Image (cartoon, grey):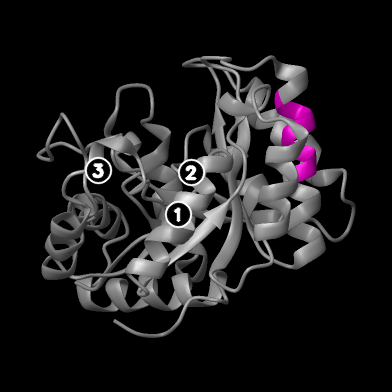
Amino acid sequence: MRLVDSHCHLQADRFDGDVDEVLEAAREAGVERILVPGWNAWSSVAALDLVDRHPWLNAAVGVHPHDAAKVDDDDWHQIARSASDPRVVAVGETGLDYDRVFSPILAQLANLRRNLALATEIGKPAILHCRSPQGEREAQDALLRELRAFGSEPPHVVIHSFSGPVDYAVEMLELGAVISFSGLSFRTGEEATADVARLVPSDRLLVETDSPFLAPPGGPRARNTPEWVRITADWVADRRDADPDRFGDDLVETYDRVFTGAPARL
């Protein structure tokens, strides 16, 4: 099966000593595309540095909700300037996290709005993180409200590492969202994700690792790596009763269409 990893933080310090080897293992496992998103100013710069060293990767720049209250104006201006760089194919990761709330909710909302505005201005998709405490949906509902506030032309968005109820997924699809599945799908409390995996159209479906986090069952617990995206891809294909070869082709085609700056190459 051909594979993509649409969300992988290879610039994280857990990869400092062996990122080249990690990428080689990913290539050997069949991973043809990897997107490296930033979460603040330095990680956005580091994503671009990785693309310079490994041109088959793609970068995104933005501010994660955890960092919403930590990024100052100079940091934001740096991110906003770099967003137009041709090496950058998306804005993010950004979004809302009402589970851990490492930044105040008002700061998260302000940060989300400026990231969405930037994505709309430059015509690139926004990569959205969205988490609520288990069994709740306040962040999901807030994210829907923010996207609907754009009226008839909401920004193009990718819902990274899907979490939430089925009706939330349906509403996101109605807004044109692409939905990406990660190792989070296997966790207790995320059972609705199996139903969501069945209903997402193939041209709006992606998979990811969120490395170095969210290792799937059978993957390494200490540090997830992009080669293990295969476990999630196999799980999603299974839920859809999809032919693995066709499913893999669809993943690559969707990645290239969604991230329009992504080259069609291995």
For residue 225, the mark is: none
Q: Secondary structure at mark 1?
A: helix
Quarter of the image with the C terminus in it: bottom left
Q: Residue at x 48, y 76 (%)?
A: 262
Residue 205 at x, y percent in the picture = 45, 61
| Residue identified by numbered label 3 | 16
Q: Residue at x 84, y 61 (%)?
A: 153
Q: Amino acid at mark 3?
A: Asp
Q: Secondary structure at mark 3?
A: loop
Residue 56 at x, y percent in the picture = 35, 74
> With respect to residue 51, does 186 lie above or below?
above
Left or right: 134 as drawn, with respect to 69: left
Marks 2 & 1, CB-CB < 8 Å contact: yes
> With respect to residue 178, does 52 lie above or below?
below
| Residue identified by numbered label 2 | 43
- Magenta stretch containing residue 19, yes or no? no
Left or right: 184 as drawn, with respect to 67: left
Q: CA distance from mark 3 to mark 1?
A: 13 Å
| Residue identified by numbered label 1 | 47
Residue 100 seen by the camera: yes
Q: Residue at x 43, y 59 (%)?
A: 49
Left or right: 66 as drawn, with respect to 35: right
Q: Residue at x 75, y 46 (%)?
A: 77
Marks 3 & 2, CB-CB < 8 Å contact: no
Q: Amino acid at mark 2?
A: Ser
Q: Quadrant of residue 243?
A: bottom left
Q: Which residues are magenta?
A: 108-114
